Image (tube, helix red, strand yellow):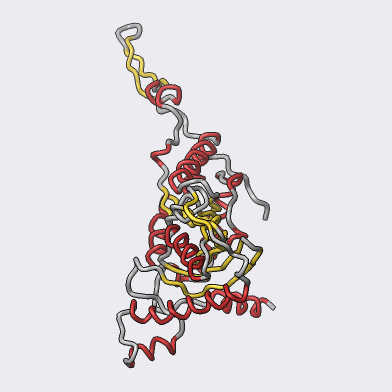
Amino acid sequence: MSLVKIKDAPTVWKYLNGVVNVYKPAGLTVQQVRHTIIGNLCRDLNQLKVRPPLERVTIESGTDSKYLVRTTEDLSDNVLVVGPRYQPEDIRIRMSANHGRLTSGVIVIGINKGLSMAYRIQQNRPLRVYRVTGFLGKATETHFGDSRVIAKATMKHIGSDKINRLLASLQASHQKKMFELCGVDMQSQAAYDLAVKGTIRPSANTQPMIYGIRLVEFRRPFFTIEIHAINETETYLGNLIHEIGLNLKSVGHCVGIRCIRHGHFELKDSLLRKDWNLQCMLNSMAQSNQLLKQHPEMLQQINSELVDLEDDQRLAEDKQG
């Protein structure tokens, strides 16, 4: 069966509902991303075949005391008068994560009727994975590289072994604090039952929680760590790099944050800025809808357990094999 290319804008508009996985560049705010996507969608929709202007009925006097009824184009509905058929106010967009200006990577957005899906993904707080790069030896005012340097320290004594030990200690402390955020006593039967089930979500949705942290690359003075977390913010990740520098008897600041996975939405499927157009959005929307059907827990949380993404991916590969 051959595919039919649709050139009718109203037909395309009916299918422009769902969630899309896009790549947010660093240096852009989420509002700038929103305005850019809306502008591109309006541009592409208006380039398709839109509805013709409405017609109005006119009654004119004719010969022999008769009236002539005619239909003419309603100039008040002409695109030269009212503007393009699709306006930015017609398209609604909601972000499922509030990434900061300096953060790049995966961000899931809902379009039109997909706003509720994006909201449910945000409320279910799926695990997000980041690659955060720090710079040792210099501290800045905001803990990021775009602000003024306020302190310098030596970092020649720092090696990958020291960083690995510190990261292991941080992960252990967050796992211990996880039970406190869940509102259960560490010595209770409820805490044991939760621990047996596996990784759990805290009851509060404001407290950042790290589920995994490891060193990915170390090239002095730069180091890159991978963080699995929920409820995190750009400011929190910057403060974390600052604290790591202090605990290593030095100072440091964050030079890059990239989200490589949001739940089951991965970096390799994200739309780059050059692909923020109508055709690519529709293709990504169909792919995202299929992904949500395979993993309904992203839309409806049925328990407090977090899905192990690595084990889930290996299980899917085994089924395919």
What x and y, as percent, mark residue 267?
Answer: 59, 60
- The image quadrant that residue 117 belongs to is bottom left
For the N terminus, the quadrant is: bottom right
Image height of 183 relative to 155, above or below:
below
Specify the quadrant of the image occupied by residue 287.
Answer: bottom right
Residue 18 visible from this viewpoint: no
Q: Residue at x 55, y 56 (%)?
A: 256
Image location of residue 181, percent across then percent down: 34, 76
Residue found at the very far right of the displayed protein: 321
Q: Residue at x 44, y 33 (%)?
A: 85
Which residue appears at 58% of the width and 46% of the height? 273
Q: How many marks?
A: 0
Q: Position of residue 25 (x, y in %)?
A: 55, 49
Q: Is residue 45 left or right of residue 200?
A: right
Q: Is residue 78 above or below residue 205?
A: above
The residue closer to the viewer here, 105 or 102, is 102
Indicate the position of residue 140 as horizontal and vertical percent values: 48, 53
Q: Residue at x 49, y 79 (%)?
A: 169
Answer whether residue 199 is visible to the viewer in this image: yes
* Near-viewer residue (137 or 75): 137
Q: Vertical placement of 53 versus 107: above or below?
A: above
Front residue of 141/223: it is: 141
What is the quadrant of the C terminus in the image? bottom right
